[in-house]
Image: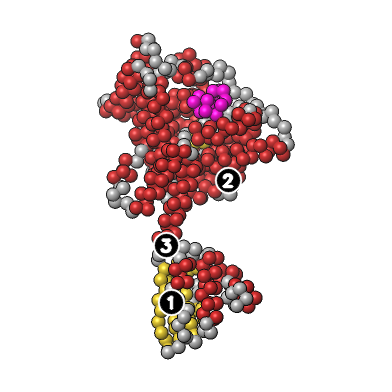
């Protein structure tokens, strides 16, 4: 226990402290922007980001991953805030946390194994594109100073690591932010700053129970939003955890992450914050800046609060161009450039799944819808592929006897082909169907077997099924009707 605690918290202290500082600075404008999207005061997003980042550091299942207020969650809150106000949003945030904790205990995190690599790649590429697109408003209709600052910031980010000694341990994004802020103040540049995004809070968050009536009516109002928030939050968190797993070559506890996200959202709701989840962009910044342990998320959350409450005058002077440079770096680093090269080598179905996921996420800005589309397409392609790995071989044993050997998987995608593989018009007295090398997976497959047996019997042939494995025999005995006269009569329509 102590060894694990030391490994997750104190094995990378310098890297976690520095990366947490970078993340805290980058979180401020994003939290304000997401608050504006949701239609609430900036402090709601800032308090939520502080609370979620700090709590998840203790109870999350993925060390080094950053969670806070996010745009995907903010988009789902707009209607609730507009129609019912902030208090109902806080209540929905609490219920979201409860649902996510329940998901953790139900081990829904294990469902991530059904998300194929092509869907994850599409998700990553789509997020990289969205992160880049989110920076465009800061680069539109601005003076040349903004472009110069952004270019200089990118130069620092990519070139500073080559500086001897200091470049290897000091995160270049932090150097970019500090340098660009100093230049902006020294030359008195009239460019957009963090302070222009919205008013920063000047007090610490306090315990706040939502002022809503505890009635069924309130529950029915917030339940649809809470279910959506819980689903999208867990989906984005699980996907981000998978990406950080790959980046750090370590494993994470997805079910514990579900519970941790729920606890963090309950904490956010009780401190006047909105629901949040894992942030792919900030997590990438954290990892790229050297963050690996829980201390990085804790540092990010704590410094965020300290900076916006006690150092707001200084933080407000950070030029947005510096943060834009950091986010462009994140976008470039997040995008899987290898996936472009692999388009020529990978199967068409894999490419379609990846590109469809990207397209849906980018055009709808709905991460859940994009991933659902990718998973659905991947499942359909897989079912179609496996459905083809089924063959029925026919041999004649005697003059009026026929033996059919079924080889492969019989389920909804291959059931029609299974039925068509038999010759029902052949005049035989006995038909033997050998299922030794076959497996029946679902009710559709069993229904197809019923149809085959009944059709042969209708033609006057004796049918014998042999070689069923235990699983196939169990599902056929439970759902098969070919030995039930009443059901056979009903199936044949009285004929």
- Magenta highlight range: 32-47
Q: Which residue is mark 3?
A: 386
Secondary structure under the numbered disc 3 in the rendered image: helix
Is residue 37 one of those drawn in magenta?
A: yes
Q: Nearer the viewer, mark 1 or mark 2?
A: 1
Left or right: where does residue 431 sit relative to residue 492? left
The furthest residue to the bottom: 399
| Residues at marks 1 and 2 touching, judged by CB atoms closer than 8 Å | no
Q: Which residue is mark 2?
A: 103
Residue 180 point in image, percent of width and height:
36, 18
* Frontmost residue, 53 versus 335: 335
Between the C-alphas of marks 1 and 2, the distance is 44 Å
Secondary structure under the numbered disc 1 in the rendered image: strand
Q: Which residue is mark 1?
A: 405
Is residue 139 one of those drawn in magenta?
A: no
| Mark 3 or 1, nearer chain start | 3
Residue 11 in sight: no
Total labels: the figure holds: 3
Q: Residue at x 55, y 49 (%)?
A: 107
Which of the 4 image quadrants contains residue 40? top right
| Mark 3 or 2, nearer chain start | 2
Q: Residue at x 35, y 10 (%)?
A: 187
């Amino acid at each position: 226990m102590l060894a694990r605690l030391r490994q997750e918290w104190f094995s990378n202290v310098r890297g976690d402290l520095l990366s947490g500082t970078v993340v805290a600075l980058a979180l401020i404008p994003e939290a304000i922007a997401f608050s504006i999207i949701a239609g609430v005061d900036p402090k709601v997003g800032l308090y939520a980001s502080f609370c979620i980042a700090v709590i998840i550091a203790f109870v999350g299942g993925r060390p080094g991953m950053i969670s806070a207020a996010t745009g995907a969650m903010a988009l789902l809150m707009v209607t609730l805030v507009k129609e019912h106000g902030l208090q109902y949003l806080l209540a929905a945030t609490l219920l979201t946390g409860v649902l996510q904790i329940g998901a953790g205990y139900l081990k829904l995190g294990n469902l991530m194994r059904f998300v194929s690599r092509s869907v994850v790649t599409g998700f990553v590429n789509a997020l990289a594109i969205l992160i880049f697109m989110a920076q465009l408003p800061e680069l539109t209709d601005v003076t040349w100073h903004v472009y110069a600052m952004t270019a200089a910031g990118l130069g620092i980010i990519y070139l500073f690591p080559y500086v001897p000694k200091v470049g290897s341990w000091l995160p270049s994004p932090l150097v970019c932010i500090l340098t660009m802020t100093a230049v902006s103040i020294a030359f008195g540049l009239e460019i957009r700053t963090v302070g222009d995004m919205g008013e920063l809070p000047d007090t610490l968050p306090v315990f706040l129970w939502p002022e809503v009536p505890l009635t069924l009516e309130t529950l029915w109002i917030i339940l649809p939003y809470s279910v959506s928030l819980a689903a999208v939050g867990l989906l984005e968190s699980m996907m981000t955890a998978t990406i950080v797993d790959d980046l750090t070559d370590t494993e994470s506890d997805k079910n514990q992450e579900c519970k941790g996200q729920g606890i963090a959202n309950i904490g956010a709701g009780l401190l006047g914050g909105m629901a949040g989840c894992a942030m792919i962009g900030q997590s990438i910044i954290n990892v790229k800046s050297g963050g690996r342990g829980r201390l990085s998320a804790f540092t990010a959350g704590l410094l965020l609060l300290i900076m916006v409450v006690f150092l707001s005058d200084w933080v407000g002077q950070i030029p947005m161009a510096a943060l834009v440079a950091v986010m462009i770096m994140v976008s470039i680093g997040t995008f899987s450039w290898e996936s472009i090269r692999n388009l020529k080598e990978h199967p068409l179905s894999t490419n379609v799944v990846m590109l469809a996921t990207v397209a849906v996420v980018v055009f709808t800005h709905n991460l859940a819808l994009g991933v659902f589309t990718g998973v659905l397409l991947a499942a359909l392609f897989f079912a179609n592929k496996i459905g083809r790995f089924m063959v029925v071989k026919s041999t004649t044993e005697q003059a009026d006897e026929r033996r059919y050997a079924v080889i492969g998987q019989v389920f909804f995608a291959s059931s029609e082909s299974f039925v068509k593989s038999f010759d029902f018009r052949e005049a035989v007295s006995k038909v033997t169907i050998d299922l030794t090398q076959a497996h029946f997976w679902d009710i559709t497959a069993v229904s197809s077997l019923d149809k085959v047996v009944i059709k042969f019997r209708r033609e006057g042939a004796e049918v014998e099924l042999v070689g069923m494995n235990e699983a196939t025999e169990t599902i056929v005995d439970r759902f098969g009707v070919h030995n039930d006269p009443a059901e056979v009569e009903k199936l044949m329509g009285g004929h």
